[in-house]
Structures are given as C-alpha cells and as structure tokens.
Amino acid sequence: MKRRLLLLATSAVLVGCAGPQVADYANQTPKLDLRSYFNGTLDAYGVFTDRSGKVVKRFTVLMVCSWSGDDGVLDESFTYSDGTTQKRVWRLHRDADGRFSGRADDVVGAALGEQSGNAFHWQYTLALPVDGTVYHVQFDDWMYLVTDKVMLNKASMSKLGIHLGEVTLSFTKR
C-alpha cells in the first residue's frame, strides 16, 4: 500500500511539473507563419530579469529579416540600457517536417523549435559573456503571435537546471 501511494504521489508531482507543449496552441489565432512574420524589418523592446524578478537590463532590437524558400536570416542589432551594443545573426532553416533549426555565432550547436497555432517554441544553449567569462546557458524560448504585427516572447534562462532569469520581449512588425 505504501509503495502504491508513493508511486501515485511521484506521478502527481511529475505530471504537475510537465510544461506546456506547442501543440497546446494548435487552435489559437492568429495563426503564426514564422517565415512570414520574421520577414522584413521589426522592432523589439525587452528586459532581462534576474531570478528574483528584478529588471537587470533593458534593451531594444532592430531586426532585418529575410527568407529564401526554407532558409531565413534574422539580423539582430541590440542596444542595451547601459549603452552597450551587440549583434546576432540567426540562420534559420525550416525542415521538411515543419520544425525549425537555427544557428548563430553565440549559439552552441543548433536551436531546435516548432510552431503550432499562434505559438513558436524553441530551445538552445547560448554562450553568454559575463565579466570576462563565457557561460553556456540554456534558453527555453516561447513566442506568441498576438496580432499580425505584434508578437510576445518569454524565454527562461538556466544553467545546470538552476533558473537564472527571464528575457521578455515585444516584437512589432513594421
């Protein structure tokens, strides 16, 4: 009996820890077409919050995006609240099964993701420089199309399973 209760309790905890799946958004509109939305010029506005929720940095991003068939380039120019700047160029590919993979110079390996309904979810490891040291941190990144022009993005950042903070962005398509 104790064994059965322990199994039941363990199962309940594991089910409670399960996060959303991109398929959960299949019926949500407007329907996201990543290649269409990330095509042209976009502006983004964001914050990085630490694990306590305190805003550590604010930033803006100018994105110039283009696609040729299933291959896309997202050229991002970041300007941070402390005056520093950063550039990231994503090279995306839409696979035959509709999933996406992406690479950038500061991404370790490939980012892998999929879209469904109004949502896009992908995960990747970013080489993040902090005070002269580069840390490999994992991103669990969700994007939600709100209107044909506005998308919200929330990414959780962790290292060795420890939550470090979140990045929250709002994209506006010109």
Image: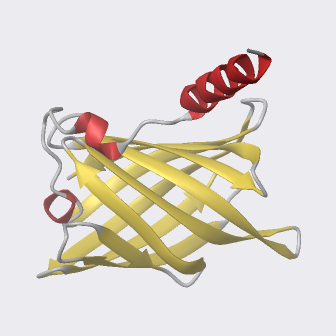
Residue at 40%, 50% (x, y): give it.
44
Q: How many marks?
A: 0
Which residue is depicted at the point 27% across and 67% down? 99
- The quadrant holding residue 144 is top left
Would residue 145 be visible to someone looking at this image?
no
Please state if 158 lies on the left or on the right of 18 as rendered: right
The colour scheme is secondary structure
Q: Position of residue 46 (x, y in %)?
A: 52, 44
Residue 121, given in percent of the width and then of the height, sits at 39, 52
In the picture shown, does residue 149 fall above or below 3? below
- Residue 83 spot, x, y in % from top left: 67, 59
47 or 35: nearer the eye? 35
**In the displayed structure image, the side of residue 109 where residue 111 appears, left or right:** left
Quarter placement of the N terminus: top right
Looking at the picture, does residue 10 appear above or below residue 143?
above
Report whether 80 appears left or right of 37.
right
Q: Is residue 88 left or right of residue 90?
A: right
Check the image and name the residue furthest to the front: 1
Q: Residue at x 72, y 30 (%)?
A: 53
Residue 38 found in image quarter: bottom left
Rendered position, 7 above or below 117? above
Res. 39 in view: yes
Q: Position of residue 105 (x, y in %)?
A: 55, 84
Quarter of the image for residue 103 reads bottom left
